[in-house]
């Protein structure tokens, strides 16, 4: 029988777990690990590597939207460093940006009650991390667009070009950085889809939609959408675009 790959989604209270099949094609969510202490968490993970005959561990790395390393990613890197020293197999990191939000969204679409979502979102997030990693292994032979950590371990795809970062100022004068994830056209009007760069683990990365217009000099400017009907129309178009991509 072939060996399996295990994925971990490290949270502050729970560790999501997913296991591949023996062919390394499909990921399945398993019961999450409730966190107690650093040593006991590592011990539980090592027990699972034995139970499932794991040959590789993939840990989701929660980078910021601009690919920088924030506080949560720092904690993950420290945990992985310790895990590597004790694990009997290779430990790899994989870019998990927006994975938890996607898992939450999928559960909402399936009408899973909020109380139950909290119990399964970590496992689903781990399964999404693992499935992305498995699909990548199956469908690419190139390594030119892969990010590596200091030990040359795979952590995911790097963007083909640098993300566009913009700074917006709120009504109180506070500045916030956003990454432009897409520009879409709806009824011959262009709109920019933005996501905040700095969000805590407990916050959802809520998209901001702005209209693209031209100023008197012909330069692009971003304008708030005041009409709720217009905003809903663009949001629906973007959701449909995401569904088509999936």
Image (tube, grey):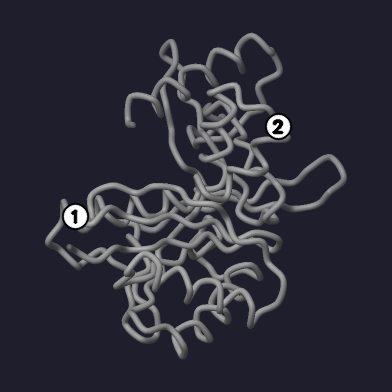
Q: Quadrant of residue 64?
A: bottom right
Residue 114, numbered label:
2
Residue 12 in the figure: left or right of residue 182: right
Which residue is rendered at x = 49% and y = 54% of the image?
Answer: 97
**Residue sticking out furthest to the left:** 141
Q: Position of residue 164 (x, y in %)?
A: 47, 51
Q: Quadrant of residue 2?
A: bottom left
Question: Where's the N terminus, which quadrant?
Answer: bottom left
**Residue sticking out furthest to the bottom:** 85
Work out whether residue 48 or residue 166 is closer to the camera in this orientation and state it: 48
Which residue is rendered at x = 60% and y = 54% of the image?
Answer: 197
Work out whether residue 11 or residue 148 is closer to the camera in this orientation and state it: 11
What residue is pinned by disc 1?
23
Q: CA distance from mark 2 to mark 1?
A: 34 Å
Work out whether residue 21 or residue 125 is closer to the camera in this orientation and state it: 21
**Mark 1 neighbour density, 10 Å: few (under 14) some (14–19) many (20 or more):** few
Q: Earlier in the sequence, mark 2 or mark 1?
A: 1
Which residue is rendered at x = 28% and y = 66% of the image?
Answer: 146
Q: Position of residue 229 (x, y in %)?
A: 64, 9
The tally of labels here is: 2
């Amino acid at each position: 029988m072939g060996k399996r790959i295990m994925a971990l989604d490290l949270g502050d209270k729970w560790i999501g777990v997913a296991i591949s099949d023996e062919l390394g094609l499909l990921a399945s969510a398993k019961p999450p690990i409730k966190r107690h202490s650093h040593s006991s968490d590592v011990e539980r993970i090592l027990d699972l590597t034995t139970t499932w005959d794991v040959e590789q561990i993939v840990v989701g790395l929660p980078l910021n939207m601009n690919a920088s390393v924030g506080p949560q990613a720092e904690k993950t890197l420290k945990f992985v460093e310790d895990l590597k020293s004790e694990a009997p197999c290779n430990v790899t990191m994989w870019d998990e940006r927006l994975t938890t939000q996607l898992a939450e969204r999928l559960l909402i679409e399936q009408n899973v009650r909020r109380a139950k979502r909290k119990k399964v979102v970590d496992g689903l997030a781990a399964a999404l991390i693992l499935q992305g990693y498995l699909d990548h292994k199956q469908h690419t032979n190139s390594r030119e667009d892969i990010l590596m950590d200091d030990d040359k371990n795979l952590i995911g795809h790097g963007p083909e070009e640098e993300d566009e970062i913009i700074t917006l100022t709120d009504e109180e004068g506070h500045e916030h950085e956003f990454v432009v994830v897409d520009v879409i056209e709806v009824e011959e009007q262009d709109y920019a889809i933005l996501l905040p760069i700095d969000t805590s683990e407990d916050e959802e990365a809520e998209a901001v939609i702005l209209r693209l217009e031209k100023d008197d000099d012909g330069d692009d400017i971003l304008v708030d959408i005041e009409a709720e009907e217009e905003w809903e129309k663009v949001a629906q178009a973007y959701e449909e675009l995401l569904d088509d991509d999936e």
